[in-house]
Image (cartoon, rainbow, N blue to C red):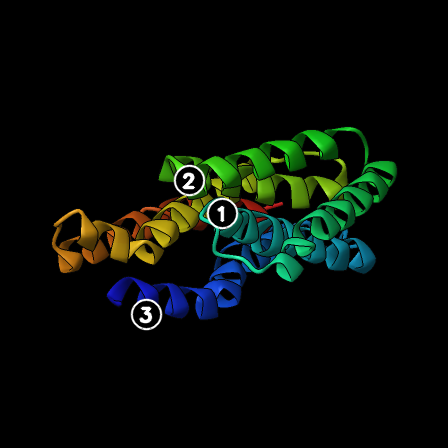
Amino acid sequence: MSRLIMDAIRSKTYPFFTLLTGVIHTIIGSLAAYPILHWERLVLIVIDVFVAQEIIMHLTRDMMRGALRKTLKMLVPVGSIINALITAYLTYLAGWLVVVFVALCVILLFYGMTFKEIMFGLAGIFAVLGSYYIQTGTIKFASVFLSIFAMWQWWGGIHLYRIDYWMEKGLDPIAERNESLIMMSMGIPPLIISIILLFSK
């Protein structure tokens, strides 16, 4: 029963977790390109990341556990098509490297949700670098440090989000929560460096 309650809570918090990780950091990655800023690309990036992380990743994981109704299973192929179309259009606008960033991000998201949390964190690197590249067509040192900041946020975030898993393993939830906060705080130094680089250009 406790597992069912936890699953219900997590299903309700999926959108908020997606906003905390994928959407917010990709917006930051795009805004870092200012004064070069294409708003239509920013909107498409946000939709693309939300679809990849919310619909494809979470629903695919639920499907593997047999927890979805048949009607909801249709959202996965539909979400995949939307993701592919947006990626193709952004590739047309910004260049072939967009495909590389998106592919790496999606693969790492999937394996990060199912196997190793560090892979989820690495997905944050390519999400931020990709959003910056889509805006500017280049990769700068500031965007690299910003992507490292995102990596620590995503890694610590997924660790905190899976706190029930660590409880099932018999680990102290308070200690795991503190570990998550430490991991997320590790992103502060690269964030400061990226801000200095952005304002010094």
Q: Position of residue 74 (x, y in %)?
A: 69, 54
- Circle on res. 106: none
In contact (CB < 8 Å): disc 1 and disc 2: yes
Instruction: Describe residue 13's horizontal placement relative to residue 137 as left or right.
Output: left
**Viewer-side residue, 108 vs 137:** 108
- Classify 10 Å Cα crowding around label 3: few (below 14), some (14-19), many (20 and above): few
Q: Identify residue type, mark 3.
A: Ile
- Circle on res. 114: 2
Disc nearest the viewer among 2 and 3: 3
Instruction: Describe residue 61's horizontal placement relative to residue 40 as left or right.
Output: left
Q: Identify residue type, mark 2.
A: Thr
**Of helix, strand and loop, which one carries label 1?**
helix
Q: Earlier in the sequence, mark 1 or mark 2?
A: 1
**Viewer-side residue, 190 vs 70:** 70
In contact (CB < 8 Å): disc 2 and disc 3: no
Q: Which residue is mark 1?
A: 61
Q: Position of residue 96 (x, y in %)?
A: 79, 29
Q: Earlier in the sequence, mark 3 or mark 1?
A: 3
What residue do we see at 17% from left, 47% from top?
169
Q: Is residue 189 above or below residue 43?
A: above
The single residue placed furthest to the front in the displayed view is: 70
Q: Position of residue 143 (x, y in %)?
A: 58, 41
What residue do we see at 61% from left, 55% from top?
55
